[in-house]
């Protein structure tokens, strides 16, 4: 049963990556507000149902603070940078880079928690590093490649592919480099957040409540951020003018991914769940190839890098 929910987690997050790209999110409207609102509504409803059913909540202030911290790092900073990078370099590349997060989690554990890194785990980190290097190298190696990666950026809302000339914006190489670096930042945030979430579960072993706290934290912080930037009106107008079906579906898919992971770890060891969940990278590449061939180019190098990241995550999870 744990394996089923772990795979559901991978499917949910890979669908999210592709749907955000398909929705063409960029600028003020990158899908962050809609998806976070979906998370909050669905998770709060589930927690409320549990409460009405008489299920006691494992409330703990320390756990609350740790889960809020995980919401800051993953649901807010990690997801917002991930969605931004998807709009710039595509779902396949962004997902592959984001899934090097376990490498950063291990780094924090070794540097700040005095944990020992086994030779096998070091090999897994090496594989993830190699995959990350290949993706960064692809972005920097030559301007023509940057233009190829950036084709379709800005409008993935199901429109027909523009001509070859219109697919090569003058700033494409710079856009790809920036998008790649933002994806790396996303991996760092997710890596740190995963470590913080583990501590939160130790204090308050209630996965549903923890996910709800993290989602509320992300929504509040996002609203504070856009208000401080003076973008509240713009973001709400762009997010709620029109149906944006891909973003709403992405919100549901993200929630499915979160719930799938948390339910899976109640049935199976975290290491086993993490291995299956790491298939998000390869699933994203497959879905992007099948459904977004016109707006996203998946090169052999990206496929190789995705496989290396997946293998690295598997090795790290099993050690």
Image (cartoon, rainbow, N blue to C red):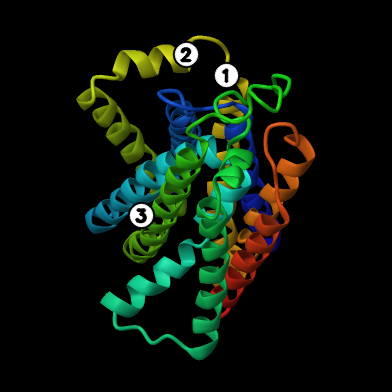
Residue appearing at x 47%, y 38% in the figure: 175
Q: Residues within 10 Å of mark 2 (few under 14, many from 20)?
A: few
> Does the residue at mark 1 contact the one at mark 2 (Cβ under 8 Å)?
yes
* Picture quadrant where residue 143 is located: top right
90 or 95, which lies in front? 90
- The alpha-carbon separation of the residues under discs 1 and 2 comes to 8 Å
137 or 228, which lies in front? 137
Q: Which residue is mark 1?
A: 244
Q: Which mark is residue 58?
A: 3
Q: Secondary structure at mark 1?
A: loop
Q: Secondary structure at mark 3?
A: loop
Q: Residues within 10 Å of mark 1 (few under 14, many from 20)?
A: some
> Does the residue at mark 3 contact the one at mark 1 (Cβ under 8 Å)?
no
Residue appearing at x 49%, y 83% in the figure: 122
Q: Which residue is mark 2?
A: 240
Q: Counting residues from the N terminus, which is met first, the one under dot 3 or under dot 1?
A: 3
Give the x, y percent position of residue 190: 42, 55
The N terminus is located in which quarter? bottom right
Above or below residue 10? Residue 256 is: above
Give the x, y percent position of residue 211: 43, 47
Mark in front: 3 vs 1: 1
- Residue with the most extreme bottom position: 119
* Picture quadrant where residue 15 is located: top right
Q: Is 214 displayed left or right of 156 in the figure?
A: left
Residue appearing at x 54%, y 69% in the figure: 128
């Amino acid at each position: 049963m744990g394996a089923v929910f772990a795979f559901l987690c991978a499917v949910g997050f890979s669908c999210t990556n592709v749907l955000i790209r398909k929705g063409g999110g960029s600028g003020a409207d990158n899908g962050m507000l809609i998806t976070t609102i979906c998370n909050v509504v669905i998770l709060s409803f589930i927690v409320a149902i549990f409460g009405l059913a008489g299920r006691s909540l494992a409330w703990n202030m320390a756990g609350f603070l740790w889960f809020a911290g995980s919401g800051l790092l993953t649901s807010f900073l990690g997801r917002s940078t991930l969605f931004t990078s998807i709009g710039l370099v595509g779902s396949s590349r962004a997902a592959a880079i984001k899934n090097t997060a376990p490498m950063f989690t291990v780094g924090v554990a070794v540097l700040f928690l005095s944990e020992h890194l086994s030779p096998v785990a070091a090999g897994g980190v090496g594989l993830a590093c190699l995959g990350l290097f290949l993706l960064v190298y692809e972005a920097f190696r030559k301007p023509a490649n940057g233009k190829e990666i950036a084709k379709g950026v800005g409008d993935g809302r199901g429109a027909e592919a523009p001509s070859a000339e219109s697919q090569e914006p003058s700033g494409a190489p710079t856009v790809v480099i920036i998008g790649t670096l933002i994806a790396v930042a996303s991996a760092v945030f997710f890596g740190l957040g995963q470590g913080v979430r583990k501590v939160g579960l130790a204090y308050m072993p209630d996965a549903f409540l923890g996910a709800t706290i993290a989602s509320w934290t992300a929504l509040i912080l996002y609203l504070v951020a856009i208000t401080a930037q003076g973008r509240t009106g713009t973001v709400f107008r762009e997010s709620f003018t029109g149906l944006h079906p891909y973003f709403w579906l992405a919100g549901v898919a993200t929630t499915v991914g979160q719930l799938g992971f948390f339910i899976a770890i109640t049935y199976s060891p975290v290491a086993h769940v993490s291995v299956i969940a790491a298939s998000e990278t390869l699933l994203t590449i497959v879905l992007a190839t099948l459904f977004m061939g016109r707006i996203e180019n998946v090169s052999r190098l990206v496929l190789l890098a995705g496989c290396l990241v997946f293998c690295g995550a598997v090795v790290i999870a099993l050690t």
